[in-house]
Image (spheres, rainbow, N blue to C red):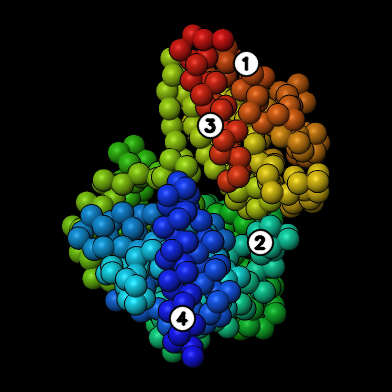
Amino acid sequence: MKKIKFIIALYAAKISQLILRLLGRNATYLPGKLAVKICKDFLAHLKPPKTVIAVTGTNGKTTVSNLLMSILSDNGYTVTNNSFGSNVQAGVISALVEDSDWLGRAKKDVAVLEVDERSSLLVYPYLAPDYLICNNIMRDSIKRNAHTEFISYVIDRALPKTTTLILNGDDLIASGLGSAGQKKVFFSLEADKPEISLPQHIRDIVYCPTCGALLKSEYIRYNHIGRHYCPECGLRSPAPDYSVTEIDWVNNKFTVLHHDKKEIFTLINDNIVNIYNFCGVIALLTEIGLSYEQISKGFSDSKIVKTRLDMISSGDLNITMLMAKGQNPIACARCYDYTAKVQVEKKGVILIVDDLGDNINNSETTCWLYDCDYSSLADPSISQIVFGGPRCKDQFLRALLAGVDPTKIKITPDSSKAADLLDTDLCKNIFVLFELYRVKDAEAVKQALITRGKGGC
């Protein structure tokens, strides 16, 4: 009976995919949702690819997934992925069904699947990943993944003991995933260590998870990412198996140390968050069996996907499009900090970080703004800031509390019109930070800035 249900669910999912493709709607989780409705344990009956890689964690999942997919594909592997759909259970199923035959057997070598942390219990018990990479676990939206202990508990509860874990050794929460005896590979960023540990406005771990004593820090880069130790029980951040030991900012290169051997890779992006992403990708691909030459060439040929980061020049304007996840206080704060630290003058910043889904019936929560560090926006290099969206007045208030000069701020409830308020005579280096569900508005802003850069109105 279960087999019959599975076959019916598989055919229903495949037929729905055909219909959706005819309608021009490829990026959807609906086939997976339909399959689970018919057969609750649908994933357990699918025959997955030979190698299954799960990518999870709070920030960086899409960047890591796309890099893995790109480098594996360039090296001759056929790859199933859910980059065009959802990272919840239904999206994972839709991706696997797309690349399975009519008996549910995988047609590709590898699956690289981005998996939302809370979907762990719905995915891993049925589809055991051979490898799982987790770059960080931090507070996320207060309505979804706000509590890091709960999120790490959910992932841990679902993880098969046979899965090899690739974990950020500089994240004391993420590095604690897995059970005793489980294979764990740690990566780290040792280059350019901060000279002092400045107090962090936001930290997701303060006390030792083993004995409850107050943790000490060798250094912290941001939030709780850094190296920590407990003076009471001796718990320490784990020693890394892969570590970024040098960063050549001028020539865009970085060095990774593994087994006393140093290898040099192309630095695709200079954001510290992404350097952790890159080191994790290198660790995972090396563990799979790719050579240095294969991985190095992949980095030389790769770029951050344009929906996450895009840089355009138009006339005398330099435009940087950077995704900032709305209602995610850490992700937004990192984007603000990155913008402030870019070594250019005459900066203009346009922020479109309202969550479109939450604007239905004007119900978006604003409490996350006060959990997010806005102090970077007060940097003297920023000449003007435009907040766009229905919550622009709330953004304005939050910026004032962070010490931003009010004469530098303009607001508009229409996100797509934010470029109209920016003084491009004053601001030549423009950063547009936008929420995942505000891509259309961000595109309208980008096109308006490109037109003005070419001399248009």
Front disc: 1 or 4: 4
Residue 245: x, y in percent? 36, 57
Residue type beneath disc 4: Phe
Q: Which residue is mark 3?
A: 443
Front disc: 3 or 2: 3
Residue 380: x, y in percent? 63, 27
Front disc: 3 or 4: 4
> Disc 1 or 3, which lies upstream in sequence?
1
Residue 355: x, y in percent? 68, 46
> Disc 2 or 1, which lies upstream in sequence?
2
Q: Which residue is mark 2?
A: 139
Q: Secondary structure at mark 3?
A: helix
Q: Secondary structure at mark 1?
A: loop
Q: Which residue is mark 4?
A: 6
46 and 86: which one is in front?
46
Real-space Cα distance between discs 1 and 3?
Answer: 19 Å
Residues marked 2 and 1 touching at CB (< 8 Å): no
Real-space Cα distance between discs 3 and 4?
Answer: 42 Å
